[in-house]
Image (tube, rainbow, N blue to C red):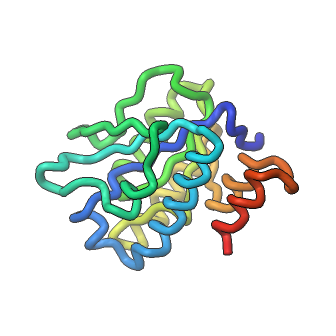
Amino acid sequence: MLIKKESSALIIVDVQEKLVSVMPKPHTFINNIVKLLKASNMLKIPVICSEQYPKGLGSTISEIKNNINKNVTFIEKTLFSVPLKEGLSSQYIICGIESHVCVLQTAINLAENKKNIIYVVQDAMSSRYQNDYLTSLSRMNKYKNIHIVSCEMVLFEWLKKAGTKEFKTISQLIK
């Protein structure tokens, strides 16, 4: 099944100051999150941005905050999974950190509702250790309604076709 912008919600999980500081090569996954965020802004896709215990881990990093508009809802949490209202969307695009903790638990909790389709953006998430990252992908891949995708897959599936104003703007993000 292709990702549809009208059925989507983007979930950005815990991309906070103290967590980012211990991630390997953070600019790569952060750049992809920003691409997803900019595209969701243009396409009017709802965005949920979670913060795990921000008093201790800091707030969402400025690269993300600087690209936020009205369609973003912030959720402060102490649970590892992002608590979401039922029926917000039917397709959830998930990115963030850490892959094997909060991203994984959010994806699996959403997958428990068989009506949900979850797309985990593998190049827009990270864990401190490569083994944890790879194990989380392997575990999530075992669920029928969790799909591992790339940032570009999401962008082009949201767009559906070339030649539009949105395509011209969003294709510039990929360069």
Q: Compared with residue 41, is residue 64 higher up or lower down, i.e. above or below?
A: below
Q: Residue furthest bottom?
A: 25
x 52%, y 58%: residue: 137
Q: Compared with residue 117, is residue 167 higher up or lower down, i.e. above or below?
A: below
| Snapshot quadrant of residue 7 | top right
Q: Is residue 132 visible?
A: yes
x 64%, y 56%: residue: 149
* Drawn side of residue 26 relative to residue 52, left or right: right
Q: Is residue 142 visible?
A: no
| Snapshot quadrant of residue 23 | bottom left
Q: Residue furthest front?
A: 165
* Drawn side of residue 40 relative to residue 131, left or right: right
Q: Which quarter of the figure is the C terminus placed in?
A: bottom right
Q: Compared with residue 20, is residue 143 higher up or lower down, i.e. above or below?
A: above
x 59%, y 30%: residue: 116
Q: Which quarter of the figure is the N terminus placed in?
A: top right
Q: Position of residue 145 (x, y in %)?
A: 63, 38
